[in-house]
Image: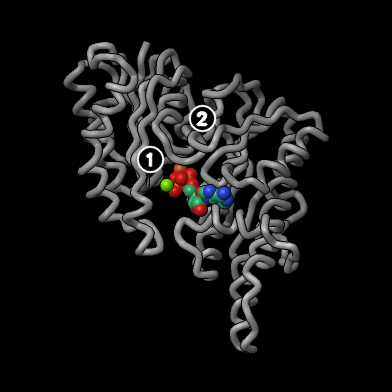
Amino acid sequence: YHLLAIETSCDETSVAVVRDGSDVLSNVVSSQIDTHRRFGGVVPEIASRKHVESITVILEEAIREAGVTLEEIDAVAVTEGPGLVGALLVGVVAAKSLALALNVPLIGTHHIAGHIYANRLIGTIEYPALALVVSGGHTELVLLREEGRFEIVGRTRDDAVGEAYDKVARALSLPYPGGPHIDRLAHEADEEIELPRAWLEPDSYDFSFSGLKSAVLAEINRANMKGEPIRAKALARGFQMSVIDVVTTKALRAAAEFGVRQLLLCGGVAANRGLRERLAAMCAEAGLPLLVPPLRLCTDNAAMIAAAADLKWRRGEFTPLDMKAEPQLSLEAWSVGI
Ligand code: ATP
Ligand code: MG
Ligand code: FE
């Protein structure tokens, strides 16, 4: 069977065709980063308009690249939320029209379930599993006691990791999105400015990154006031080390407490070299199997949406055609069987 999936929750327009749940026949991604860069972040109105302009072309390209005909599509999956409402709407309208025209089921899909199940495209997930979700809008520890059952055991109380990366990068006058630039500077640094770690309560799996971000800004201000040069590399390294220490330590502690068989890393910040390396080393030491998608499956793409939608396809859980875009869709409520 073939699932066609559409993702337009933020600034990537993507369409994929996936066979039998995990065989990616095409995964076309058109990024708007170049458009948004000059504004230093995603401008929602522009994102919606760009999705409208490109969705048809991307759809045709995904079908052509997959080497299937529209008649061979068995269901249409689409990101229902969370995300920017205007951006989501473009994908939702396209998906509904296509499902109606082809007379196949529609599967509204959770964006973060997609990031998590991107791991199914590269390996077999063993349950119970724990997902460390680090993206532009989310930082969460998600426990999966069984397939398709999401339980958030920890989440950020303020900024998401990716958001903190982007804000710190902006303060250092680096281009948007800043994550990759901070990652690079942190690796080039030969010294480190020690920054605080927000552990929160001893038993908490929650995160907080606004204090860390403020510490970076304070250091930049201090240097400016004194007329000293800004030690961007040392700051980038200090910031990255604080983030990595906290997220990896909490993930490993939760993995031990819940006795999971696997750790899944996912979301755009999973592209971070420092994080991948540290987590791999810690998991190896703990004897905990780790799955990490390749970079193109870490950032927003439609193949991951098909991978998550497949959970519902196999159970025959479809979405009515009056589905709406849900900017605040809950992950736990999207679990299968409820
Ligand atoms: P969400 O998935 O929460 O809705 P999103 O889709 O905007 O948010 P993603 O596309 O998953 O987020 O990830 C984008 C984020 O990943 C940006 O904040 C970007 O800076 C960050 N990022 C990308 N590469 C790296 C890297 N190498 N190191 C750190 N952060 C990175
Ligand atoms: Mg994006
Ligand atoms: Fe995302």
Q: CA distance from mark 1 to mark 2?
A: 16 Å
Image quarter of residue 185: bottom right
Name which residue type carries label 2.
Ala
Image quarter of residue 291: top right
Q: Is residue 3 left or right of residue 71?
A: right
Q: Residue sitting at 58 percent across and 40 percent down?
A: 152
Q: Is mark 1 within 8 Å of ligand 1?
A: no
Q: Residue sitting at 21 percent across and 43 percent down?
A: 52
Q: Position of residue 57 (x, y in %)?
A: 23, 34
Quadrant location of the N terminus in the rendered image: top left
Badge 2 density bin: few <14, some 14–19, many ≥20, Cα 10 Å: many
Q: Position of residue 72 (x, y in %)?
A: 28, 11
- Mark with earlier residue (1, 2): 1
Badge 1 density bin: few <14, some 14–19, many ≥20, Cα 10 Å: many
* Residue 307 vertical position relative to residue 169 in the rendered view, above or below: above
Residue topped by disc 1: 81
**Residue 173 at least partly seen:** yes
**Residue 332 at least partly seen:** no
Q: Position of residue 239 (x, y in %)?
A: 66, 62
Q: Is residue 189 left or right of residue 224?
A: right
Q: Residue sitting at 77 percent across and 53 percent down?
A: 202
Quadrant location of the C terminus in the rendered image: top left
Image quarter of residue 150: top right
Q: Is residue 279 left or right of residue 125?
A: right
Residue topped by disc 2: 118
Q: Position of residue 232 (x, y in %)?
A: 62, 69
Q: Tell me whether the residue at label 1 lies in contact with that at label 2, contact meaning CB atoms closer than 8 angstroms.
A: no
Q: Nearer the viewer, residue 136 or 106?
A: 136
Q: Is residue 292 left or right of residue 324?
A: right
Q: Residue sitting at 47 percent across and 24 percent down?
A: 336
Name which residue type carries label 1.
Gly
